Image (cartoon, helix red, strand yellow):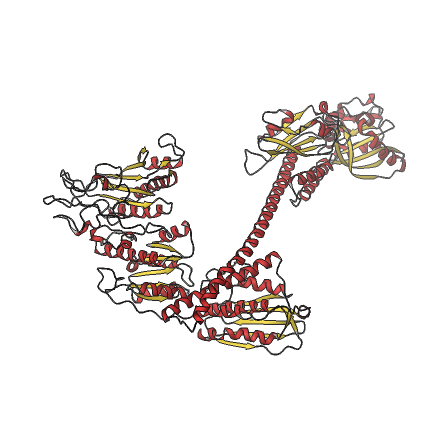
Amino acid sequence: MTSPTEELFGSGSATGRLMARLDWAATPLGPVQSWPQSLRAAVRIVLSSRYPMLLLWGEQFTQLYNDAYSALIGDKHPGALGDDVRTTLAEGWDVLAPLIADAMATGVASWVPALQLLLDRSGYREEAYFSVSHAPARDDDGRTVGVFTVCSEVTEQVVGERRLGLLRDLSVRGDGRTVDVASTCARLVEAIGGHRLDVPFAAIYLREGTALHRVACTGDGPVAAVLPDVVVDGDPAWGLWAAGGGAITEVHGVAHRMTLPAGAFDEPAATAVALPLPSAEADQPLGVLVAGVSPSRALDEAYRSFFHLLAQQVAVAVRNARAYEEERRRAEALAELDRVKTNFFTNVSHEFRTPLTLMLGPLTDALADERHPLPPEQRERVDTARRNATRLLTLVNSLLTFSSLEAGRAHSRARQVDLPELTAQLAGVFRSAVERAGLRLEVDCPPLPRPVALDPANWERIVTNLLSNALKHTFVGRISVRLHAHPAELRLTVADTGIGIAEEEIPRLFERFHRVDGARSRSHEGTGIGLALVGELARLEGGDVRVDSQVGRGSTFTVALPWSALHRGTDDTVAASDLGDTARAAAQEASGWLVDPVQPEPAEEGSPGTLPDDGRGVRILVADDNADMRAYLARLLTAQGWRVDTVGDGRQALDAIRRDPPDLVLTDVMMPEVDGFALVRTLRGQPDTRALPVVVLSARAGADAAVEGLDLGADDYVVKPFTAADLVARVRATLEGARRRQRAPDAEDDRPEPPRSTRPAGAAPTPAPPPTGPVGGSAAGATDSTRSLTGTAEAALAGAATDSTPSLTDTAQAAPAGATVDPTPSLTGTAEAASDPAPAAARTMDAASPEVAPAVPGHPVAGPRRAAAPAGMPTTVRVAHGHETASGVDTGWSYPSEAISASAMRRDVRSSLEALHVHPDVVQDLLVAASEAFNNAVEHAQQPSRPEVRVRLQVGAGTARLTVRDFGSWRDRRSAMDRGRGATLMNAFGDVRLMSTASGTTVTIERRLTDDQG
């Protein structure tokens, strides 16, 4: 039989079992047997509930509770059972007492959400939050003798929401739109200072060089007084230096350093954390965040995670501020650069006008001189010069106008004009060019209902640019110009049936220098500011411009001017005498896009311009989108006895080559449809045109542009402006090189690509070298194969017969009668007779040594500037003592000491190695090593006695040897082969030897070939 105590507390819960063993007789409630039925019922309700419940009974507020409530009071359980609640929760009784008293006095239940309560349940005075309900508890007589308390802890929710609010405030305060990083940091600590319950104090340190500098902290009192301003290497203060290295550091004993009330109950802060501010580099944080820990909350995992998020938010804000600051400085620098550029354009444009005036004046006078008329040929030349000087003046005026608009110095000098008549006249200037292009020009400019005032010069530029743009991009159909009055505005509409504009390009159409990539046009010429100028001038006149376009159907440009902008004060001092000049110049330029000039007749065969061994002359195809340039090149080349055909772009050139292949192609780079580089790429990709000589003309100066053209396979690259003699010499040398390749045995069978000129554009031609052997041929046994293969213009400039020029290397030198020359390859170099009449110093390469022997002092290097034999062709000779080697190559080249020459060197070496079927991996390794050696020779050779670099390639007996020689003293001299990355690469791909003397440095690279290549 169970006792009354077991019956009441026998619910099976842990707290119930503790209550069953408790001596209730020693409590104010007395023995369980004496408890009233109402108390027993209340206890059963509490113990059976899984929600935290507390029953306070009697005047002493004796506590009875369940398992769920015991978890809330922590260390106070189980001592609180049967004890007075005023003792158990003494630290929070001032908050609970009014609620309990109200429930007992009124008999009405209460509900308080998120009630803050001070608890000492975990060894410290804790800030806790509970949602609490107090309801009256009645005895058997209905009197209120106690309180039912139902509660749930919401501390984590309350604290979590509060911390999220701080992070949200940081994101708002640190949006990166402040003027600098320091201001951003000040805003951040201001936001942190508003959340002292979670972060009692904070400071931000940022890295500057090797030190950490404090840029902001909360408050100006004790925090600023105790935290250091600067932390240097190794300083242990506040754990800042360790945190600056990436480690999160806890700082204890803060209360001994400063007195700062903190937490929910204003107790001294005792702990802080120093957290690194992460950056893009994990081992180099931006700085450190020092944050105080609330004494009312334990530094648990949730609190640490909050500090981690806090540091990340601060770091993001600092990075954004720095990015914004850098962007602002960049924008200021760009604005300054733009201002300087605008001033430069303005000044240069003004300076251009004086020489242009002195050019146009005499040219125009010469053409108009009836007393001393020019001969037809001279008139054509002078007229070409005048047209292009006029075009240059138009470009200068456009740049000057645009720079004035950008600088805000441009003004609209309005005057009363008959706008329909002016517009019709400007459109009429283009009628001839439009009709010559096979198009219709429709002009509809009826009289306006009211007078208008605007700047006629600005209007002329607007109409001219729109018409010029329409003609450039329209190939069939019509161009219409309409000027009509509308209720609110005056509209000029220029419509065409041209190629149209893609929708994604329209927003950028009026940006300066923007050009639609790949758009079909009559010419690739232009500055890219025409439409931008239209937009700027339209806005200057008080209006705007818009465009409607569909690809393949055409475009419509509309300039809208409100009537209010057309009724203003006029400037009667504006001269109108030069109106129309801009339109006439633009129409004249447009006419050049449409037709070729008359082709000049070639000179008679056998004239001085004809190559000595050419009985029928050669035919050259010129591709350029500028009509005057085509005419000039045709006259220049025809005067040399060559036949010349001209086309306007790369596509026409390809069609002409397929119909009738020429002997040489001379092409511009910037052309519509197919540009010059695409033309070269196409020709080199087709077997039947792979060896066709190509010389590239371009206004793009610089080594990068030349390297791009040569790497694609062009034989030479000429930069505009060029001299007639230079261009003719380059063309002649390219033709001569191609003719020699055709005569060379097996030259076309295995040659990967044609050899190309190594002299960069703009370099002065080198005179032909004096022969190193007997002039006029070789001794008995020497054959025609001893001639030098140049591929450049040097020999041609001197007019020397090519078969009288001895080879630089790898050829049988002139020998006395009886000397034998046998077609057997030699690894060591030049085959020489036993007694060589030529001085040893005159030879540029010594067969017995990898060193390059000096040439005769005071003379150019003997032999050609390129390989002494066709690239990739083995040399087959017998050395004087009769030793024979396996099939191989021994050849050499000489290049200008310029970085651009490296690409030509690589092509020559590659061609020679591939002709011997060397494995591609070995070829690539040797090319990498050779490039490094060549670049070192160019970069490090100081004050060279000869501005050249010589390269020698020897292949035989399973070994490839490359020798690179310069003729200067080396800069930044260090121990042998200690030259950084270049030496490392060279050693990685072969055995490297270096010999440096006062006269130059020689690098030798040797590499074993595979067995099947030897």
Q: Image check: 415 left or right of 106?
A: left
The part of the image, by quadrant, that contains residue 931 is top left
Residue 662 quadrant: bottom left
**If the image is split into quadrants, where does the C terminus sit?**
top left
Quick one: which residue is furthest to the left in this view?
818
Q: Position of residue 664 (x, y in %)?
A: 30, 60
Residue 605 location, quadrant: bottom left
Q: Is residue 123 above or below residue 103?
A: above
* Residue sticking out furthest to the front: 371
In this view of the protein, can residue 593 be seen by the observer?
no
Residue 732 picture location, percent across and down? 29, 57
Asked if residue 589 is positioned above or below residue 890 in the image, the reply reads below
Up/down of 62 relative to 356, above or below: above
Q: Position of residue 286 (x, y in %)?
A: 59, 36
Comparing 226 with 196, the one in front is: 226
Along the line of sight, which residue is nearer the eye, 802 or 187? 802
Q: Is residue 787 visible?
A: yes
Classify 933 as above or below 766.
Answer: above
Q: In the image, is 272 to the left or to the right of 114?
A: left
Quadrant placement of the N terminus: top right
Asked if residue 693 lies left or right of residue 574, the reply is left
